[in-house]
Image: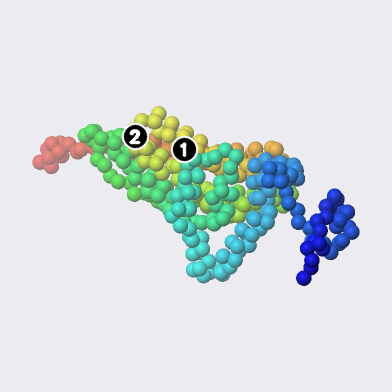
Amino acid sequence: MAAVDDLQFEEFGDAATSVAANPDATTVSIEDPGETPKHQTGPLRGSGREEDDELLGNDDSDKTELLAGQKKSSPFWTFEYYQTFFDVDTYQVFDRIKGSLLPIPGKNFVRLYIRSNPDLYGPFWICATLVFAIAISGNLSNFLIHLGEKTYHYVPEFRKVSIAATIIYAYAWLVPLALWGFLMWRNSKVMNIVSYSFLEIVCVYGYSLFIYIPTAILWIIPQKAVRWILVMIALGISGSVLAMTFWPAVREDNRRVALATIMTIVLLHMLLSVGCLAYFFDAPEMDHLPTTTAIPNQTVAAAKSS
C-alpha cells in the first residue's frame, strides 16, 4: 500500500503540453456551466428552399420513396397492389381535407400531407360526393326556381348524375395525367426540377375539389350573385392549393414556361367550376317549358261527316 507522503498534487499549466509529455494519460474536460457552447456558423437557408431541396430528393425523401416502393411491390394485376392505395386512416383524410380548405402560404401541400402516404381513398369519395352534390343541387335549384308556376311539372333529371360523373372524374384523372407527363418531360430538359409522382398529383387534385361540395350545396340558393360569389371563393381556395403545390415543381424552369404552366392549371380549374355552375344551375331548362298543341276543330269535323 502506498504511503501518504507518496500522494502529491501536481499543477498542470498547459493541458496540451501535459498530453504531449504523457500520451497514454486520460484527460477529462470540465466546462463552465455558465459558458455558452460555441456552434459553428453556416449559411442559413430559407424554409421554401429547404422544402424544394427535400422534394428534389434528399435522404428523407429517398427513404420515403424506398418505403413506398417496398409497400407497393405487389404486381399490378393483384388486389393487394390496389389495396395499398386505399390504406389510409380517417385522421389522415380529415387532416388533408383541412389542409385543402386552409392553405398555408409558403407550405407545400405534398410535403405536409401527401408524400408520406399518398392515397386514392379520399380523392375517389370526394369526387363521388361532388358528383351527387352537383346533380341533386341542380335538380333542387331548378325546382325552386319554377316553384309556384302552374304550368310547371317537376321531372327529376337523372342524366345530370352521369354528366357530372363524366366531367368530374375526367378532370380528376386526365388533367393530372397530362400534368405528370409534362413535368416528366421538363424534368428531362431541366436539372434540379422538383418531381411529383402521378399518384401524388391525383391526390392533390382530388383533395382540392372538396371545397366544391359545400359550394354546390349552397348553389341551391336561387340568386345568381350569391352563386358567383361562392364560386369565386371556392376557386380562390382550391386554385391557391394547386398553385402553391406545383410552383416549386416549375420554378427552376424557364420563367415563361413556369408562369404558363401555373396559369394553365388555374384556368383549367376555373373552367371546371364555372362550367359546372353555368350548365347545372344557370342553364335554361327547356324540357319544362309549357308547350302548345293544336286541337282539331271537332265541330267542323262532325259537320263534314254528316
> Which one is in front, 191 or 93?
93
Res 38 quadrant in image: top right
> Which one is in front, 199 or 177?
199
Q: Residue at x 12, y 40 (%)?
A: 302
Q: Which amino acid does label 2 sit on?
A: Ile
Q: What residue type is labelled 1?
A: Ala
- Kindly report the distance in space between the C-alpha atoms of the residues bearing marks 2 and 1: 16 Å
Residue 99, above or below 121: above
Q: Which residue lies furthest to the left in this view?
A: 306
Q: Residue at x 40, y 29 (%)?
A: 225
Residue 221, disc: 2
Would you say 271 lies left or right of 299 here? right
Residue located beneath label 1 in the image: 234
Residue 300, above or below 68: above
What number of labels is visible? 2
Residue 47 appears anywhere in the view: yes
Residue 49, above or below 150: below
